[in-house]
Amino acid sequence: MSAGWFRRRFLPGEPLPAPRPPGPRASPVPYRRPRFLRGSSSSPGAADASRRPDSRPVRSPARGRTLPWNAGYAEIINAEKSEFNEDQAACGKLCIRRCEFGAEEEWLTLCPEEFLTGHYWALFDGHGGPAAAILAANTLHSCLRRQLEAVVEGLVATQPPMHLNGRCICPSDPQFVEEKGIRAEDLVIGALESAFQECDEVIGRELEASGQVGGCTALVAVSLQGKLYVANAGDSRAILVRRDEIRPLSFEFTPETERQRIQQLAFVYPELLAGEFTRLEFPRRLKGDDLGQKVLFRDHHMSGWSYKRVEKSDLKYPLIHGQGRQARLLGTLAVSRGLGDHQLRVLDTNIQLKPFLLSVPQVTVLDVGQLELQEDDVVVMATDGLWDVLSNEQVAWLVRSFLPGNQEDPHRFLKLAQMLIHSTQGKEDSPTEEGQVSYDDVSVFVIPLHSQGQESSGR
Amino acid sequence: MSAGWFRRRFLPGEPLPAPRPPGPRASPVPYRRPRFLRGSSSSPGAADASRRPDSRPVRSPARGRTLPWNAGYAEIINAEKSEFNEDQAACGKLCIRRCEFGAEEEWLTLCPEEFLTGHYWALFDGHGGPAAAILAANTLHSCLRRQLEAVVEGLVATQPPMHLNGRCICPSDPQFVEEKGIRAEDLVIGALESAFQECDEVIGRELEASGQVGGCTALVAVSLQGKLYVANAGDSRAILVRRDEIRPLSFEFTPETERQRIQQLAFVYPELLAGEFTRLEFPRRLKGDDLGQKVLFRDHHMSGWSYKRVEKSDLKYPLIHGQGRQARLLGTLAVSRGLGDHQLRVLDTNIQLKPFLLSVPQVTVLDVGQLELQEDDVVVMATDGLWDVLSNEQVAWLVRSFLPGNQEDPHRFLKLAQMLIHSTQGKEDSPTEEGQVSYDDVSVFVIPLHSQGQESSGR
């Protein structure tokens, strides 16, 4: 297994896709090269490099460069599962302009310079090749910026107005919004949800146009107006680690965790299984000898278990099969949310996976301003390669063991990310049980929250 | 407003419905009068009355009788919303025999006496009349007993066997069950889920046959083998109150809490709305002046909010409308789960409510054996009439204020239930904000957990 640092890779002939606006808008919006991914220069010695528009935020530690927002670090190991790295990452400054649609559905930039500033970190874990992950790393931030710019007036208001133009049609409109409890953070959540969907559509179009395939998970953290938003679609994970607290900031979406949603869809649309799969869950795949016996089973409406008498149709391959990390949707995929996979079919059949996959993320919000931050409070974001062998508690133990003794080291978050990855490689001093080793790609961001208070500009 | 204690009431000509087995079974099972609802005599002076098979578990405190299981109490106020009390209750001993289906699909009672003993408390809050609530109070325990008897072999095994007859077809069958983490408690959860569904079917048939209508919420607590199971479908609530802890044991199902599920169904089956409703959520109902404006909205995939330009179809009545306690599904119903309502339609239309309603409960499990019980640890179960005016914290405060000073009073749980109800009636010493008053029916069970340790028989 060789280890290599992330490098920017494009597939041959792959253009940077131009995000297009979703649904109701009539005329296309001209694509502008994003001012995103312009590096921050807050760390000594990093200014020159991070200004390069084509520089990627994830760097070799050997070159001593740091990431935007004082210090956010990522490390990626290519486990050589495929020719290209299936883990991809992106991070940078999120420069939101003040724009709106005019009467003629034309996009008007009211404020060409940045109006709101945020920061963005994203991990994409590809499958079926790196194409979707690379597209996502190059696209999602643009989709998000555009979605945020579309609601920016609501973001900076004390309370989002019922009408985006601020006009009050009913005198009690603000009261209706108040009663629904709608806050600016709900607009950011909505923008993240829409951006994931838009990015998924872009990936679908681009992969089809270039004859490529594949999908990826997506885990995104966005710092904006004093809050950290974590949006997750897939099986990567983000946790907050503080001196006395470990708080999960995401929830994994796998065929197991989303069993009921997936079974429910097959119940409503049995034709999606083309008569080849059974929707029901059994402890193992049934066989002829089980016919007529009463065996344990679960259907879509059950969180408990019951017994049913086995019929012939129960002997089909299960919609969700396998256990834990081995669980597969339609015998094919280990995740139930993510981007791409529009062309993915069950081997040797015409059965599509996509109807069962959601591109919409779950978003959690961390009110950083309420935390009374300590210097060593960090968010650890990583792909499943890390979490397969390290528990939240083990990661927190490594964080707490390392940071307090290295407060003067400007590269300590980078070194911590490195150490976390080394701990997945079965080193002797690894805290994993019985020296467990990850054979997957592994990517880690360590995001120090303390920097946010120093740099956060709000508006 | 008059207050009356619950009395057993049947609708004119209403027979006690005979539960029928669900789905796959071919031949009908003869109905046997349930041995359920035979009162416990654990409290002094209650033995004679509680042995009467037709005695209902909820009594007037004036008669000084107590409920099964040492002391479980209920109080019901009829707020005179309808001629009959729309709140109904049931509780009693749950006597589970050892039975199984034979080769000829015939129900064989292997152990005519009770094999496992549990206890059952249930609250049903009716709407559109008391019919469904009365049927549920008379039926659900029989459905549950039958469902539990169907899996009793699995309940008493160290681990539920893959095959109900215990025959091992694959040597590794126990390992498959182990890996899925299937425990006896999952069979109880499954039995509760199936019993709710079966009871819903019974209610549908009985109401149709007798030309009656209506529906009800259902909140059930079952104590079995050292665990307390709380199954909820509707907006009643159960909480655990201990000296240092308040733990919700149920979750309310209303059009607001189940917005995404309901919108999702309307997205998949738009014909359910018959062109009369809009699936989208807005802060208020839109009107002509909003046309063409960009307003706040949410669709089924969104937990956040975004803006959309208002089209004509957005002016329709919303699928979910209103705020908080006023929120209504299709302008009609304030709950999104429950039993009955098979005939319920939107006023002056043919649009049915039932496809949007689920009868399946959410079940939580309290491992009472792990609690290190104190004398004053109780579960408070109540219909929404209580929770509309008292918060969990206020109820806990009343519990903690009352119980410690009354440990010698054999009727203290009864008196506590009474006090909780009186607190909803705007008395001067009520802890409700600004003397809030409940105009709804109110029913309360106070279940002392400490008794369980003394009486629980396990097997």
Image: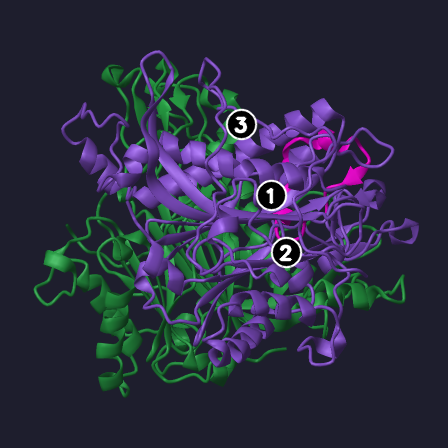
Chain colours: A green, B purple
Spatial separation of the CA atoms under disc 2 and disc 1 = 24 Å
Residue A212 left/right relative to B86: left
Q: Is residue A201 above or below residue A245?
A: above
Check disc 1 and report the residue beneath it.
B261
Relative to B119, B236 lies left or right: right
Instruction: Choose the circle earlier in sequence order: 2 or 1.
Output: 1
Of discs 2 and 1, which sits in the foreground?
A: 2
Q: How many marks?
A: 3
Q: Quadrant of residue B325?
A: bottom right
Residue B389 visible in rendering:
yes
Q: Going 84% across and 36% down the picture, which residue do you hit? A: B347
Q: Residue at x 63, y 67 (%)?
A: B418
Q: Nearer the viewer, mark 3 or mark 1?
A: 3
Residue A448, percent from left and from top: 38, 76
Front residue of this view, candidates A426 and A10:
A426
Chain at numbered mark 1 = B
Q: Are marks 2 and 1 on the same chain?
A: yes
Residue positioned 72% across, 56% down in the render: B4
The question of residue A178 being in magenta is answered with no
Magenta residues, start to end: B255-280
Of all chains, the one bearing label 2 is: B
Q: Residue at x 80, y 32 (%)?
A: B275
Of residues B333 and B436, which is closer to you in this image?
B436
Mark closer to the chain start, 3 or 1: 3
Assign a secondary structure to mark 3.
loop
For disc 1, the neighbor class at 10 Å (few under 14, some 14 to 19, many from 20) is some
- Label 2 amino acid? Thr
